[in-house]
Image (cartoon, rainbow, N blue to C red):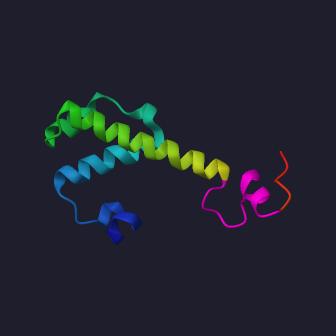
Amino acid sequence: MRALATDYTQAALTAAERVMVEYVVQLTKDATRIGPEHHERLRAAGFDDQAILQITLIAAWFNYINRVADALGVGREGAATGAEAQAAGEAAPAR
């Protein structure tokens, strides 16, 4: 699992897992560059259309949630939101 987090290209993945991860990486980097060839690779690796949809939805959802969390400073030390600052008795961040 550590190899997957640090360098997925070095992780011990099955051929199908590697195709799926490469698809998700491309979706994360630039979804506008996803084309029919990506879906064909997934199908050739054994994923049907429902699985491709599920992979896409899950990856897109995590990308969305992570961007929202990043924008709000969730998980970053010292990046309290207005509600968190108010609860702690601090001044809310300037808007």
Q: Position of residue 59 (x, y in %)?
A: 39, 44
Locate the C terminus and report the quarter of the image it occupies: top right
Residue shown at 34% from the left, 38% from the top: 56
Q: Left or right: where does residue 64 sit relative to residue 22?
A: right
Q: What secondary structure prevails in the magenta region?
A: loop
In the rendered image of this protein, does residue 47 appear above or below residue 25? above
In the rendered image of this protein, does residue 13 appear above or below residue 59? below
Q: Position of residue 46 (x, y in %)?
A: 13, 41
Q: Is residue 76 magenta?
A: yes
Q: Left or right: where does residue 10 sit relative to residue 87?
A: left
- Quarter assignment of residue 85: bottom right
Figure label count? 0
- Quarter assignment of residue 28: top left
| Residue 38 visible, this angle | no
Q: Position of residue 32 (x, y in %)?
A: 45, 31
Locate the N terminus and report the quarter of the image it occupies: bottom left
| Residue 43 visible, this angle | yes
Residue shown at 21% from the left, 30% from the top: 49
Residue shown at 82% from the left, 63% from the top: 89
Q: Position of residue 87 (x, y in %)?
A: 75, 59
- Point out the stretch of residues depicted in magenta: 73-89
Q: Is residue 74 magenta?
A: yes
Residue shown at 31% from the left, 51% from the top: 21
Q: Left or right: where does residue 80 sit relative to residue 3?
A: right
Q: Can you name the residue that lies furthest to the top here? A: 36
In the rendered image of this protein, does residue 53 appear above or below residue 14? above
Q: Left or right: where does residue 76 sit relative to residue 12?
A: right
